[in-house]
Amino acid sequence: MTDVERDYVRHSALKLALDGDFQAPIHQLLKSGGSEILDIGCGAGFWTTDMAAKYPISHFTGIDIDKDIFPTSGVTRNVVFQRVDLLELPLPYENDTFDYIFIRCMMDVVPDEDWDDVLNELVRIMKKGGYIECLETYPDLFDTGPAMSTIMQLVNADKSSADEPASMMLNPLPNRMAAINQLMGMQIKHLHTPVGRYGGAMGALLLEHWVRIIESSKQKWIQNKLIGEKQLAATLEELQQEVDVYQTYMSWYSVVAQKKGYKGPIIRVEDYDTLQLQE
């Protein structure tokens, strides 16, 4: 399974977990048409194309540093994909361009020291009254058994060997967004998603996602002598049963905020946990 296919598995799981593609209060805005939406780090455009099909009279722009993975078929007329490096600021857009900006799973992509500049740049290109939404996962899995704990140690060893800043593990986006004076009405939602067949279709998809992460990383782990090939194979087999016994889960958070300067309604502040498990 390629990275693109693995991303589709994650996209499908999150769509089930969130009962949709977004948390921001923008349904009526997009349905009315004429809105400009920006998908940051769009990859193969799964989120972008789903949204564009659902809201055909709004316009969607997906940006990513890798243009080779952009979709080449099945794209509606209200979508454009552009090769843009998020770290090359300023971004090629005018002030007050977008009604809604969506970011998902970019914590491991943007260096910690660049986040403040990136967020402020995104606020610059948002319209007054526009929304920004960030969806990220916490780095650790919870209620793990011995096999999954071994895998998480290997994943963390990868990050340490890559000299990833320790503060990247802290998921700093809520605090950083709260510090931006031009944003208001920040809304935070915490979500727990099962990893394993005990969690129904969603849990099975996220288990598949983790299995594919392991498969794509195993040669590097073995070559670096972090684990033996036979031990890794046994660990992988064990964890696929173990997650159901321990009821392993992932935790996510979405942060939504609105740009000041709009005289319409302000979104309410909410901070709550939800646990969605399927029998």
Image (cartoon, helix red, strand yellow):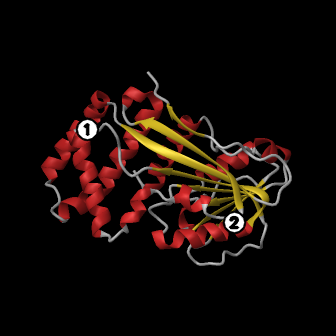
Q: Residue at x 52, y 41 (%)?
A: 190
* Numbered circle sitting on residue 146: none
Residue 246 seen from this side: yes
* Displayed quadrant of residue 244: top left
Give the residue at x 31% y 36%. Answer: 143
Judged from the image, the secondary structure of the residue bearing numbered disc 2 is helix
* C-alpha gap between disc 1 and disc 2: 42 Å
Say left or right for 29 vs 185. right
Crowd band around label 1 with a 10 angstrom C-alpha radius: few (<14), some (14–19), many (20+): many
Which kind of residue does numbered mark 2 sit on?
A: Val
User: Could you say which quadrant of the image residue 238 lies in?
Assistant: top left
Element marked by disc 1 = helix
The residue located at (71%, 64%) in the rendering is 182
Label whose residue precedes the other's in the sequence (1 or 2): 2
Looking at the figure, which quarter contains the C terminus? top left
The residue that disc 1 covers is: 239
Residue pointed to by mark 2: 123
Contact? badges 1 and 2 (CB < 8 Å): no
Q: Amino acid at mark 1?
A: Leu
In the rendered image, the residue lying farthest to the top is 279
* Residue 53 appears left or right of 42: right
Is residue 86 in view from this perspective?
no
